[in-house]
Amino acid sequence: AAKETGRNNVQCYSARLHQHSQERANLAVQLRHALANGQLSLYYQAKLSIDEGRVVGVEALMRWHHPELGEISPAQFIPIAEDNGMIVPLGEWALETALQQLSEWDALGLPPLHMAVNLSARQFNSPDLRKQIKSALTNSGIAAHRLELEITESLVVQNPDTSIALMKKIQGMGVRFALDDFGTGYSSLGQLRHYPIDTLKIDRAFVRDLAISREDQAISKAIISMGKTLGLTVVAEGVENVDQLNFLRSYQCDHTQGFYCHRPAPAGQFVSWYRQHLSMQHSPCSE
Ligand code: C2E
Ligand code: MG
Ligand code: MG
Ligand code: MG
């Protein structure tokens, strides 16, 4: 009977696996049309200075509104887009759209913000990247220093010399780089000083249990002090409550990004929130 059950489990597992890869294949096909069909949009999440609660910038986050399946998480569709190469046109669209949005906010007279856009390895290795960045900057009229590209450690580690050389060229245009999800990858602290980056983003895995885990406190403290020693701006991701915020503030972390202060929102909602935030003095993240 045990054997039977075992075989059933295997059959069940492989059926699920098949179903899973079938779903993935379907999504991959649909993703090819999602952009043209207007199913993609960008949400924006604020980054705030931890000491004053000033909004310093936003991160653009892609959203896919599927007509039948509803909202599909980028954690699900970005890897698919990376596999089938769709991330290159999608990423170009995100870059263009985010910078256009920023110039619209400037035109509204809002205090100038920085725009962070995520870049995946496939985009980074595309020969058109520099051209795409240049044209997005030119088309929007946004100064290069206001654009920050978020990349992950794994991207750099795959091919350190080539990646660093390309990053330096892009940095030469004035664009900044942030290392996203820091602490989860493979680069040693020693390697970090060779990376031409301006910002370090502490992964939210270390922030989550900050109030109860001494280990996570020690890791966060170490990342912040090392980042600051290297002259980097340090951002904590995934800050969901005031306890986490207070810990990070006491460790002199520079910026905070997370649901506690602001949840990613469509452009219009972000503007309303931003205006309201501007009208409230001395309120890091008032509820
Ligand atoms: P990421 O770049 O690390 O973005 C931060 C993620 O954390 C976002 O998830 C954001 O919604 C979420 N987050 C922010 N604050 C909190 C918090 O307080 N608690 C929790 N639990 N989560 C928080 P999202 O929007 O689902 O994006 C997931 C990932 O998908 C991103 O991680 C990024 O790697 C990728 N992604 C999103 N948009 C793009 C894009 O335009 N291009 C590329 N290449 N990747 C993208
Ligand atoms: Mg990011
Ligand atoms: Mg991140
Ligand atoms: Mg991430």
Image (cartoon, rainbow, N blue to C red):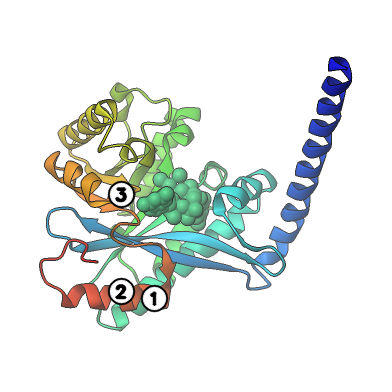
Marks 1 and 2 in Cβ contact (< 8 Å): yes
Residue 239 is marked as 3
Pointer 3 or 2: first along the chain: 3
Return the x and y of residue 89 as percentages of the image width and height.
60, 59
Packing grade of label 3 (10 A; few <14, some 14-19, many >=20) is many
Q: In this rendering, is residue 20 above or below 54?
A: above
257 to the left or right of 246: right
Label 3 vs label 1: CA separation?
Answer: 20 Å
Return the x and y of residue 235 as percentages of the image width and height.
27, 46
| Rendered-image quadrant of the N terminus | top right
The local secondary structure at tag 1 comes to: helix
Residue 218 visible in this rendered orientation of the protein = yes
Which residue in the protein does label 2 denote? 273
Between residue 64 and residue 174, name the one nearer to us: 64
Amino acid marked by disc 2 = Trp
Circle 3 or circle 1, nearest the eye: 3
Label 3 vs label 2: CA separation?
Answer: 18 Å
User: Image point 42% across, 25% down: which residue?
Assistant: 186
Amino acid marked by disc 1 = Gln
Pointer 3 or 1: first along the chain: 3
Distance from mark 3 CB to nearest ligand 1 atom below 8 Å: yes
Amino acid marked by disc 3 = Val
252 to the left or right of 75: left
